[in-house]
Image: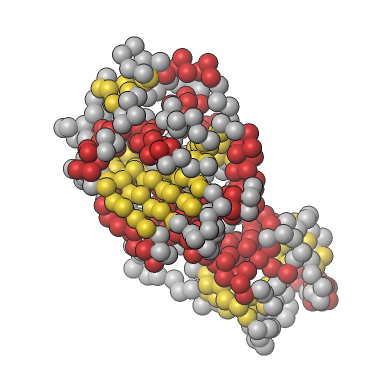
């Protein structure tokens, strides 16, 4: 772990990490001489300034490579590499944030905190925390950056927790605890309330589980809001596939299937802590998907509170069933924009791999706004089409639609189903099935849950509050 603090200046005997461009050119003034004096040492280490390279100088300082050009992304990657290179008892100062690019401080803080992240709750030998002191930093800017980074840490912790230890009510409780501390109001719907409110998707998916489902509503209401954003996050605590059961290999990482809900809960807490002047309403359907004796069967039909019906042909296509409940509730609030985020389809990961998320939307301006928010955070989204005539893929003989459209165009078919529950309002769908989990560490991401999407949602709220 890495803690970030404001430093008052260079400290004798404490290494100083500074940025270097490709070709071993110091990215800020005052550091070139130290580089030149350590030429032989850097040669031995093969240090050229390539992005993410780390090298120790003769005087003990640390050169951090930014690559060919300094940018927020290269700073974030470089800071992540620095964080992973530090020992648990390390103390360093840094001037990485002094590089003249927009968002430099935020990028460096994110890289350090997120790159140095480790989920050690279940380890008997825990590492200590390294500290990085920012020299001559804007304290207010630094503190805001820490709030954003800590939000993603919270999301990662929720995702990485084993499913046995985060039953739906327990997971919701962890989210409520953070929400209350940030003065975000919460309302937890029990199974009985779900029945009364006709949230039929959550009830159908949870039918095979011994652990009761819930739906968590979180609300942030600033004094002078400049709009309203509704967020919906998929909260499948563990996805066995239900009666359409997954293979053993495909089940190993299914504790991460609530990554969308984690991102939303973490984001709204950060939005409140940052006092962003935007009303944010969050809807988090939370449940297991298990193959118990009462489980929903292929061929069953779900009737939602808005009257629409879905024939369930594959119980492993459950994310869209619970998101439909959240989207209905979000649309009833008549927000300016609805955004849902979910580890929804394997088809999306096949299409875009594990480092890019899919982005669907009903208005090109909203699509571009969300993509821009992601780009600012170093989170990549690729726009996918809402092909209207693909609706034929999910036509049902006995209901309004069926929950799967077959092998081809699966991510698009899923998005088209979700669109039916938005009541025609402005809506963006984020399918994060690929980047929500990393199979190995890279950039500022650890192996395991990444918290992907958390910072994009926070940035989106900032942009909307700013009139975008």
Q: Is residue 364 visible?
A: yes
Residue shown at the point (31%, 13%) measured from the top left: 398
Residue most extreme to the bottom: 12
Which colour assignment does the render follow?
A: secondary structure
- Image position of 378 with respect to 14: above or below: above
Q: Position of residue 330 (x, y in %)?
A: 42, 40
Q: Residue furthest front?
A: 224
Q: Where is residue 14 in the image (x, y as percent from the top left)?
A: 64, 82
Residue closest to the eye, 378 or 240 = 378
Q: In this view, does 363 lie above or below 406?
A: below
Residue 233: percent from the left, percent from the top?
42, 44
* Residue found 21% across the figure and 31% down from its top: 295
Residue 74's place in the image compared with 233, above or below, is: below
Query: How many marks are shown on the rendered structure?
Result: 0
Taking the spot 29% from the left edge, 36% from the top edge, the residue there is: 199
**Left or right, 297 with reference to 40:** left
Q: Which residue lies furthest to the left in this view?
A: 293
Task: Let me know if residue 178 appears in the view.
Answer: no
On the rendered structure, is 346 left or right of 379?
left
Name the side, left or right, on which 62 lies relative to 5: right
**On screen, 44 above or below 14?**
above
Task: Return the x and y of residue 16 as percentages of the image width and height.
Answer: 68, 77
- Left/right placement of residue 137 relative to residue 236 reads right
At a point 70% along the width and 72% down the height, the residue shown is 95
Foreground residue among 223 and 63: 223
- Using the image as rendered, state which of residue 311 and residue 134 is in the foreground: 311
């Amino acid at each position: 772990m890495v803690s970030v603090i404001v430093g008052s200046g260079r400290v004798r005997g404490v290494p100083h990490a500074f940025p270097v461009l490709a070709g071993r050119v110091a990215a800020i003034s005052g550091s070139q001489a130290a580089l030149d004096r350590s030429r032989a040492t850097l040669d031995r280490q093969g240090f050229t300034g390539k992005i993410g390279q780390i090298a120790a100088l003769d005087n003990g300082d640390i050169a951090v490579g930014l690559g060919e050009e300094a940018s927020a992304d290269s700073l974030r990657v470089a800071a992540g590499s620095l964080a992973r290179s530090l020992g648990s008892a390390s103390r360093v100062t840094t001037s990485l944030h002094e590089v003249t690019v927009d968002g430099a401080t935020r990028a460096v803080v994110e890289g350090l905190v997120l790159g140095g992240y480790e989920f050690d709750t279940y380890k008997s030998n825990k590492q200590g925390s390294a500290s990085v002191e920012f020299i001559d930093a804007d304290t207010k800017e630094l503190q805001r950056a820490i709030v954003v980074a800590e939000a993603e840490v919270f999301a990662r912790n929720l995702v990485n927790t084993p499913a046995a230890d985060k039953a739906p009510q327990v997971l919701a409780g962890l989210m409520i605890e953070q929400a209350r501390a940030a003065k975000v109001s919460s309302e937890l719907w029990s199974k009985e309330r779900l029945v009364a409110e006709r949230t039929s998707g959550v009830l159908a998916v949870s039918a095979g589980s011994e652990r009761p489902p819930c739906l968590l509503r979180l609300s942030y209401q600033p004094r002078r809001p400049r709009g309203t954003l509704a967020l919906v996050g998929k909260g499948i605590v563990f996805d066995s596939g239900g009666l359409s059961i997954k293979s053993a290999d495909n089940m190993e990482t299914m504790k991460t299937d609530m990554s969308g809900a984690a991102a939303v809960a973490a984001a709204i807490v950060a939005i409140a802590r940052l006092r962003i002047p935007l009303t944010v309403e969050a809807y988090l359907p939370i449940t297991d998907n298990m193959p118990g004796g009462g489980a929903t069967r292929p061929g069953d039909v779900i009737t939602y509170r808005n009257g629409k019906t879905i024939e369930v042909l594959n119980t492993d296509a459950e994310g869209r069933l619970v998101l439909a409940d959240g989207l209905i509730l979000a649309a009833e609030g008549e927000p300016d924009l609805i955004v849902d985020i979910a580890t929804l389809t394997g088809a999306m990961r096949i299409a875009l791999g594990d480092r890019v998320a899919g982005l669907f939307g009903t208005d090109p301006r909203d699509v571009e706004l969300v993509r821009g928010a992601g780009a600012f955070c170093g989170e990549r989204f690729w726009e996918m089409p809402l092909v209207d005539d693909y609706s034929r893929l999910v036509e049902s003989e006995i209901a309004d639609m069926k929950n799967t459209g077959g092998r081809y165009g699966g991510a698009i078919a899923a998005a088209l189903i979700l669109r039916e529950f938005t009541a025609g309002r402005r809506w963006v769908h984020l399918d994060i099935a690929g980047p929500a989990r990393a199979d190995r560490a890279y950039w500022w991401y650890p192996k395991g849950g990444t918290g992907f999407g958390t910072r994009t949602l926070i940035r989106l709220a900032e942009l909307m509050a700013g009139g975008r």
